Amino acid sequence: MAERVRQPLVLNEIAASGLAEHAGRPPREVDETDWPHFRNGLLGHRLTGLALSAREAGSLLLLDTQKEELVALHRDAMVTALRLEGRLVELAEAFLAQGLDMLVLKGPATAHCFYSDPSARPFSDLDLLVRDSQWDRACELLASLGFERPLPEPRPGFDVRFGKAALHRSGTGVNVDLHRTLTPGPFGLWMDPSELFEHTDTLTLGGSALGRLDDTSSLLHACLHASLGWRPPLLLPLRDIVQIARVGSIDWDRLAKWSRDWNLGAVLRHSWSTTVAELGAAPPAGAEHFREAQISVQEQRALDAYTTGMRGRGGMSRATVRAIPGLSGKAAYLSGLLLPRREFLKARTVEGRPSYLRRWTIPGGWLLGGRKHS
Amino acid sequence: MTAHWIRFRQNPIVLCRKVDDEVIVALPYTISMHGLEGPAGTIWQLLGSPVSLPELVSSLANTYGVDANEIEGDVKRTLDDLMGRHLVEEIVGIDG
């Protein structure tokens, strides 16, 4: 007999559907009055594919109207995924022709390499990693292919020195997030992204062999994205962690080394704890190390900047300043934030004239907000 | 004496996704997509590995519980349509 449970809980169960530890659980159904929230939750957490899989497996019971709506939503998501994959094949060819190293991150790589059916794993943009030394050429290439940056670089050299990625948008609405590291802020700065290019694998797509992070690096990225990408974490990135850890061939020793060398212990512990709590997924033996790891004050403080209310009050920027070595580096970062080029200021201004004064009041707001909440 | 055989398979460059009973397929470098539903979707799945026309007809006849002779023409037309869209390719081999 089907059980009705709280709507958020059903979302978590959808994200965990198909995992062996949940086999035999009674099927769930969603009350008609809860359906709009549930449907929006599926969309927000990108779970339409897993929901359809759960329905096929009999663990989610839907009314015909609910099923039709879900199929239509997922169809849209898959059309988007196919459109992006078609563009990805073209882009990979263009990068190769220019002699630029490029690795596919997340979306298509995760869907094809770690899910039994890529249809279960939607994505809405392309994330590509390039080397610092090739960053400018990669941006130029995208511009030559008709992509524009909605948000320009704050100051020349800022991206390569302090940035994580820059969004590039085509005229047809294809978004490419060009990365130079895997995550923003202190954790992205502490990493050495060039090392990721020494551990790669292949994604075969559209008859082409595209570079991607290897399984261990993919797991690292999934953990970073799940814990640091959103607050609170989205459910699909948590499921990605489980998929990659179980399907991939993980070098746990290398992951532990990177965790130590790049100060990522707090993030890895957080991502595993969250995955276990939200999905009820048993962690693989290799992950136990991270769940029990001792965390430095520095790492914990940096993590708090992403995962607590500090995030909305400039926490990440302040954590980034702390992570940048040397006074000149800190000054360069702050001047990029406080004295950006006019083009950047204009792009960041929602209404009215671009104004440095308005921008300078933001940190003041953080401080006042911080006091209110402290 | 050698004999030629002809089989058909999905064009390896085709991108595809399955949504409920529909298979959506697309070719890189184009913006067009095709939705394959019902028997066309089943034909597409069967073309996941190389298959001859008689094998294809036989499998479909079994799946849908119909006489092979009744559907052979429709299967051939569907196959021609998929080949015309470059979604399916023909492989010719020689036995022996």
Image (cartoon, rainbow, N blue to C red):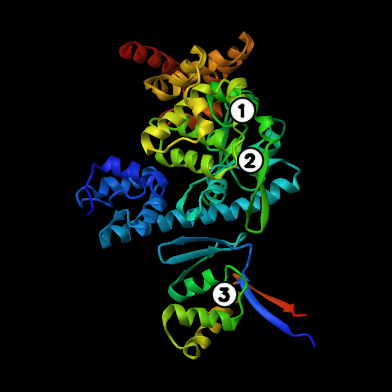
Q: Image point 40% across, 30% down: which residue?
A: A231
Q: Position of residue B18 (x, y in %)?
A: 47, 61
- The label nearer to you, 2 versus 1, is 2
The residue under label 1 is which amino acid type?
A: Asp
Q: Is residue B86 visible?
A: no
Residue assigned mark 1: A159
Q: Are marks 1 and 3 in contact (CB under 8 Å)?
A: no
Q: Secondary structure at mark 3?
A: helix
Q: Earlier in the sequence, mark 2 or mark 1?
A: 1
Nearest the eye: A43 or A150: A43
Mark 3, residue position? B82
Q: Which is closer to the viewer, label 1 or label 3? A: 3
Viewport quadrant of the N terminus of chain A: bottom left
Q: CA distance from mark 2 to mark 1?
A: 25 Å
Which one is in front, A113 or A229? Answer: A113
Is A281 rendered above or below residue B37? Answer: above
Marks 2 and 3 sit apart, C-alpha to C-alpha, by 35 Å
